[in-house]
Every structure is written in C-alpha cells, then in structure tokens.
Image: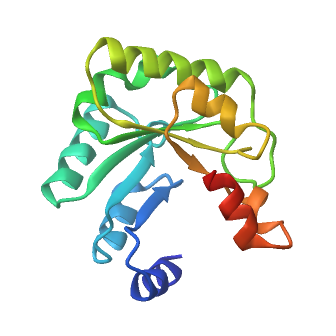
Amino acid sequence: MKEYSNSIKQMSNIPLDIHLMVENVKEFIDDYMGLEPNVITFHIESLSSKDEIMQLIKYLKQNNIKVGLALKPNTKIQDVYEFLPYIHMCLIMTVEPGLGGQKLIPETLEKVKTLKEYLDKNNIDIDIEVDGGINAETIEKVKDAGANIFVIGTAIVNEENIEKAVQDFRK
C-alpha cells in the first residue's frame, strides 16, 4: 500500500489522507511519514491504553501531521471525547471495517449526531468524517446528522461513468 500511496503522491497535489486499519499503528505511521501526509487517521480500538492514543496524537502533531481518530460502529462515541481537543478529525465508521460495498448501519447516524452536538456544545472545531455505505440514498442522512467529510467507495467505482458519479455527489 505504501508504494501505491507514493505513486498517488507523485501524480497529484491533493493532500494525502491515510486511514490506518492496523494493529501496530506506530510502525505504520513511521512507514508512511516519509510521504508527508496531510492527515493520518488511526483506530482507537487498535491501542491498549488512553496513554498510547495520546502519545501517538502528540507524535503525529510533532511531525506536522494532522490527527484523525477512527471509531468502529460498536465503539461508544464517548470513548473519544477526551481526545477531541487535540485532534483534527473524528472518523466514524458506518460499517464494520474491511469490506467494501456494505450497507450503512443506521445506528451510526445517531453516533454522528451525538458527536456533532458534543462538539458544538464544547466549542470544538474538528471535521466529522464518515466511511462506509455512503451512496446517493445515505449521503444526505449523514450530512444532516453532522458529518462534513464523506468517504465514498463502491458507490463511485461501481458506476459505468465514474466522472459523472463524482459530479453527482458533489451536488
């Protein structure tokens, strides 16, 4: 994957956003750091303690990399609250990580809404990203819940006219 990311970095000036779905997070951060990514997101479930999470947040920031924290569908949103003032983005997985083409888990919309309300109440300004099952039917629902960044995979790549699909989502 690193070689693939490196190729993209060489061909594009779009900021590199790396989402790590791995257990040995620090090792992969070190591996990708040379690509000078804009943001690296990692799953809080991948680490065994809050101290480890905070150490990685500090490590990324010391290296001028924005920090994203990801949560699986069954992880309580409250588990990320204490880290929100120190990060740039919270990624809520709206499907179980790993397989493309899954349907959005409806209960995750409430998690997005709860996070948005918490951020507003506590005057914390970070992005809310959603990943999984985002398509023409679900994008408005997650947007209305409070998300402002949407990872759209199969709803685009499975279309015959990818360019038109991208344009349709941008509307």
Q: Quadrant of residue 90?
A: top left
Residue depicted at 27% across the width and 52% down the height: 66
Q: Is residue 38 above or below residue 123?
A: below
Q: Seen from this angle, which residue lies furthest top?
A: 121
Residue 95 in view in this figure: no
Q: Quadrant of residue 104?
A: top right
Could you say which is closer to the camera, residue 8 or residue 41?
A: 8
Residue depicted at 43% across the width and 48% down the height: 42
Rendering colour mode: rainbow
Return the x and y of residue 107 as percentages of the image width and height: 70, 21
Residue depicted at 18% across the width and 59% down the height: 64
Q: Is residue 26 above or below residue 109?
A: below
Return the x and y of residue 77 as percentages of the image width and height: 49, 21
Judge from the rendering whether residue 34 lies leftward or rightward of residue 4; answer left or right.
left
Q: Is residue 62 above or below residue 106?
A: below
Could you say which is closer to the camera, residue 55 or residue 144?
A: 144
Residue depicted at 66% across the width and 62% down the height: 167
Return the x and y of residue 70 as percentages of the image width and height: 48, 40
Quadrant, the N terminus: bottom right
Q: Seen from this angle, which residue lies furthest right?
A: 160
